[in-house]
Image (cartoon, rainbow, N blue to C red):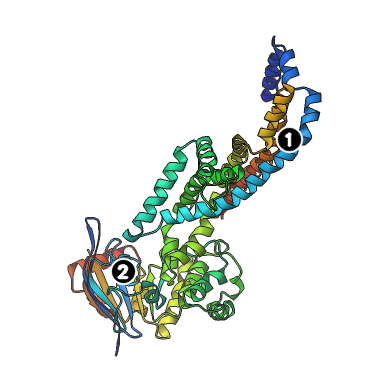
Amino acid sequence: MSTALQIEGLRKSFGKLEVLRGIDLTLAEHEVVCLIGASGSGKSTLLRCVNLLEPLDAGRIVLRGEEITAGGVDVNVVRRGIGIVFQSFNLFPHMSVVANVTLGPRKALGLSKSEAEARGDELLERFGLAEKRDEYPDRLSGGQQQRVAIVRALAMQPGLLLLDEVTSALDPELVAEVLEVIRELAGEGMTMLIATHEMGFARDVAHRVCFLDAGVILEEGSPSQIFGEPKEPRTQQFLERIVRAGRL
Amino acid sequence: MSTAVLFAIVAVAVVSSAGWDEVKQAFFSRQEFEEAFPDILSAFWTNVQIFLVAEVFILVFALAIAVLRGLPGPVFFPLRALAVVYVDLFRGVPTILVIYILGFGVPALQLPGVPIEPLFWGVVSLVLVYSAYVAEVYRAGIDSVHPSQSAAARSLGLTHGQTLRFVVIPQAVRRVIPPLLNDFIGLQKDTALVGLLGVVEAFRQSQIEVAASFNFTPYIVTAILFIALTIPLARFTDWLIARDKRRQQAGRLA
């Protein structure tokens, strides 16, 4: 199986706070990896580093054989191939749904308006959002907004999708519709790196689960191993807290 | 009601004052009013033109300054510094001095190809001064757009410039329309300062009329014309602010 993403010795600090303290992680093509861990363990920062939204302090990231953290790499070109979906959706409030979805293809990929809209409409149709194409984001439910955000990322036809706690800002009854979309993408073989608090979902959808603790990957393994028989005491404690909270 | 009472008291105090009859004759002469009005009105057209031309340049120029000031990275430090110096300078110097210095100074240099018309330099002065204020208004608007909006745009592969143009500035401008209009109300009045260079606009025309008749009524004519121009814009600004407030409240309820 060929390698999609390779992260080596990634370190990142904000001021004196060292958020990532040496991350090594490899994703194979079509692999779905879930990052779990407490808030502040570095999951979001790791995803933002992979998308080059945060500069690294040390380490390197290789995407399909090309080191994207090397000097002279055009970050705008790299980002076209990596989709990211944020916890708080971050849709553009002054644009209609279809304008949100087609902005990247039109401006970053140089597609014509009609080409971009054809691509966008097809995706909106597929994810049950066709009738919302001309609405503005504030007229949509949280679940619909997040699905639009996913479609916006997919419209760039990325080879890697990063999902940053995409259901954390949603009301409980809206979580399922978003997770369903992600399941569908996993089923189609989309390579995904997913930071999540939804342990049940991680167990279902992930090929591999990584437990982040204090800026390092403390433990990784198959979902059944991590959730069934975690080796590290910190992992056990974390999962016990999750179970007690009724989230697993 | 209390407002009406207050106005009534002030009016009675003014009208019953010892010098009222003389002031009335000097400032509120009906005959002088009617004689001065047509000339001042046609001169006032110059103020409107100054305002309209300056406004267009200010909107564009100020945005450029605000964008320069927000350029990221050490490479652009000189441009950022230039923008800061510009804003500090033109917010610091009184408008009347800028108009005198440019309006009398630059033509006196007798540089070939450089305009010498006072009207030109008056408009340039207003553009320079007001751009400094408006650039700060734009900057406040740009800063008010949450960084997650830029992150979302950059994550799609848009450049810094594309992110500003398609995502940040459209949202920023919407938010700062009321303060922008407020600055333009100030600009409408300050067009009178161009008259100091000898341009015959409403204020200069009224000075000419006063000098001819030794009656101050033309000043009142000019004041009324300025009020007639600024009040509609002021009410429009109020209306926009009220509308935004309603929308925000509606958004919170939704």
- Numbered badge on residue B69: none
Which quadrant would residue A60 be assigned to in this image?
bottom left
Amino acid at the residue labelled 1: Ile
The residue nearer to you, when weighing B166 against B83, is B83
Residue drawn at the location 33% of the way across and 62% of the way down: A245
Which quadrant would residue B43 be assigned to in this image?
top right
Residue B165 image point, x, y percent:
50, 63
| Chain ID at mark 1 | B
**How far separated are the C-alphas under marks 2 and 1?**
65 Å
| B148 over A9 or under it: above or below | above
Which element carries disc 1, helix, strand or loop? helix
The residue nearer to you, when weighing A84 against A130, is A84
In the rendered structure, are the residues bearing label 2 and label 1 in contact, judged by CB atoms less than 8 Å apart?
Answer: no
* Residue B253 in view (yes/no): no
Amino acid at the residue labelled 2: Cys
The residue beneath circle 2 is A49
| Chain ID at mark 2 | A
Residue A2 image point, x, y percent:
29, 89
Which element carries disc 2, helix, strand or loop? helix
Quick one: label 2, few (<14), some, or many (20+) residues within 10 Å? some
Residue B211 image point, x, y percent:
70, 25
The residue beneath circle 1 is B40
Q: Quadrant of the N terminus of chain B?
A: top right
